[in-house]
Amino acid sequence: MSENLVIVESPAKARTIEKFLGKGYTVKSSFGHIRDLKKKGLGIDIENGFLPQYEISSDKKKTVSELKTAAGKADTVWLASDEDREGEAIAWHLAETLSLDPEKTRRIVFHEITKNAILDAIENPRDIDMNLVKAQQARRVLDRLVGFELSPILWKKIQPKLSAGRVQSVALRLIVDREREISAFEAKPYFRVEGVFYAEGSKKPIHATLDRKFDTEDEARAFLERCRGEEFHIASVDKREARRSPAPPFTTSTLQQEAARKLGYSVSQTMSIAQRLYEAGLITYMRTDSMNLSTLALGTTKEVVTRLYGAPYAKTRNYHTHTKGAQEAHEAIRPTYVSNLDIEGTATEKRLYNLIWKRTVACQMADAVVEKTDVEIRGSRIAEKFLASGEQILFDGFLKVYIEGRDDEESENLTVLPTLGEGQLLNCNQISAIQKYTQHLPRYSEASLVKKLEELGIGRPSTYASTVSTLITRGYIIKGDKPGVDQEVCQLDLRDGQITRSVRHEKTGAEKKKLLPENIGIVVTDFLAANFADILDYGFTAQVEESFDKVAKGRLSWDKVISDFYGPFHKEVDGSLQDQEHTRSERLIGYDPASGKPISARIGRFGPLLQKGASDDPDKQFVSLRKGQLIETITLEDALQLFALPRVVGHYGDAEITTAIGRFGPYVKYDGHFVSLAKGQDPYTLTEEQAIALIEESRNKETKKVIADFPDAGIQILNGRYGPYLKKGKENYRIPKKQDAASLTLEDCLAIISKAEKKK
């Protein structure tokens, strides 16, 4: 056995490190955490200072046994888990669980997996930082307490299988609050006036916007009337030189945001790809809130910029992090070797690496120098003025490599104006008054939610991916599209002294890949806000994060953080448990005009539903809400349409065909059989011909599905998604590739089943 055992978190990281260490070193992986709080019960001894009760995960017992054996044979054990709090906790759990001798145990950390970084770490080992361990332990214990005590209340008050979390509940509140702001928003029309002018002898148009907006069409028309026969001239030209600086290198949060904007990656996808790049030794550690770059990185990046673009493009910059609790000793996310313009890997890995490379190189490049031009255009008889702006790049600097993305999705188009002088007369080609509507705030995307959480100081960048994933998995939110609103747009055009009016319809406010709250998410948020205000308070949650940072720096005791939080919190839990009322979140929508019965919306056992009739009405009816419909915004008109189902469509043979919406979506029903509607088909408008086509297609599929049937033995040979297979009872069996499914006898089937069961 080698005299040195190095323990890392992942096999990929182990393989990369093993390349750099020579003989005498064995590298093994712990596959992440080897132990956690006990799953059975709370796993925390509240009476004894919130002492955590740890257990080895069932799937890690073999790993622990192998590591213990290897550690017993090694002269020195090097704990090389990641450099953050989670990694420090893993190192401590390994030392405790494997009963490592402190005299022969070393803790090493590195920001990048390169030969120099690893050899330097081995030359400079340290002890396990117990302050970081305690900070991780405080977060883990606090989150377990919140989840363990809140979840049963949600089961009792709202619906079984719900859960709450300290950070996820606040993130959910942000999404719910934004949706309510949008629901309450009323779009107001206004008219924006735009003019197209030409300088004498120039074919380049000058697009200018009036410095005033009009509330009504009459006001806009009156302005255009005043512009008839008007002579326009350049009132002023303001030219100034401006400099644009590059964005700083990536932190975890900014990488997540930019990968979403530019590459369309989800937060979890970005972190997964970045993890692979790090473990392959291609980028520095991907969980960091620091914008610091090492002296070596600054030097090599300067060399690369000078070689690729020339000396005038190089400018060394040192960035400092302003995030609370940031660790300046860490580095920003950058390529380990900036000289590597390309890498081996998958398409997604290459795209993310390229993004990181560009951002790193651009941040060490010179400012871009632009000439900004602001032009004021006036007429002799109008008080208002038209404004035009242009921009010309004098020196592209960092723009040669990279421009940071924007959340508002505006383009970076540069407008270059012709040469203009004060007093110069202009030809007016056209003036248009175009009706616009005020827009609501955009819904959160994953990127903008991450940005908001970071601004509020809630959670940490390393937790954002799991926070969003948890909310989607639990059904509290969905990532979806909003089609926008169809609006009538009026436009008045003044051209050649004549005013013309045109009307068109436009869809505005369409949004893609946004986070939308589901009904159950809204109900949970309202319940928590009413009963556990601190849990959903942004400031309070940020203060808890600051407390964790103080624990990490040794300025605060971890159990005091828990004690200060748990006392008031547990009191609120007890108060809520004593209240026996069930939270129905029921909303009366209106009354059925035909029967006069009340129609209400609420959360039911299988999700949101509508009820027609009072609770004691023996003939009350129920119908599920459609995807995207919310209890608090559904209208009586929408509700009445839902109650129009089930709807008789026609007949198939002697059986009646009806359409309805069930738990798994819209369907056709006939003679006790159910067939799901195809994508885009509507149960309210489906015709008899379309329904019959669906039924016959389904029957043909069923016919083709059965290749052979042996009813006495209870065995069938079926066509499946991945080819033919055997089915006996509830068990499925694979047919060997060499055997023809259609020619199998009962004896052949029994032989295949027998062989498969022996293997089991």
Image: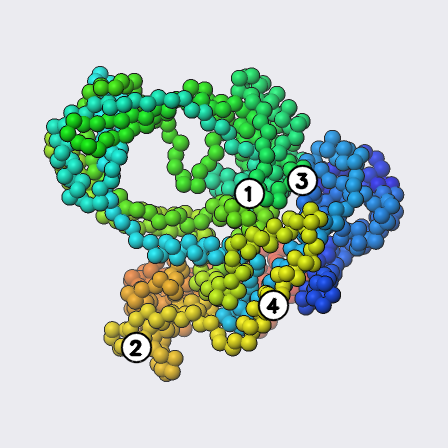
Amino acid identity at mark 2: Lys
User: So how many labels did they put on this image?
Assistant: 4
Where is mark 4, residue-wise? 570
The answer to whether the residue labelled 2 contacts the one labelled 1, judged by CB atoms less than 8 Å apart, is no
Q: Are marks 2 and 3 in contact (CB under 8 Å)?
A: no
Q: Amino acid at mark 3?
A: Glu
**Residue sitting nearer the eye, 6 or 167:** 167
Quadrant holding the C terminus: bottom right
Residue mark closest to the camera, 2 vs 1: 1
SS at mark 2 in the image: loop
* Camera-nearest residue between 281 and 89: 89
Which residue: 24% across, 40% down?
213
Q: Which residue is mark 2?
A: 597
Badge number at residue 760:
none
Q: Residue at x 73, y 40 (%)?
A: 109
Pointer 4 or 2: first along the chain: 4
* Label 3: which secondary element: helix
Mark 1, Cα crowd under 10 Å, few <14 / some 14-19 / many 20+, is: many
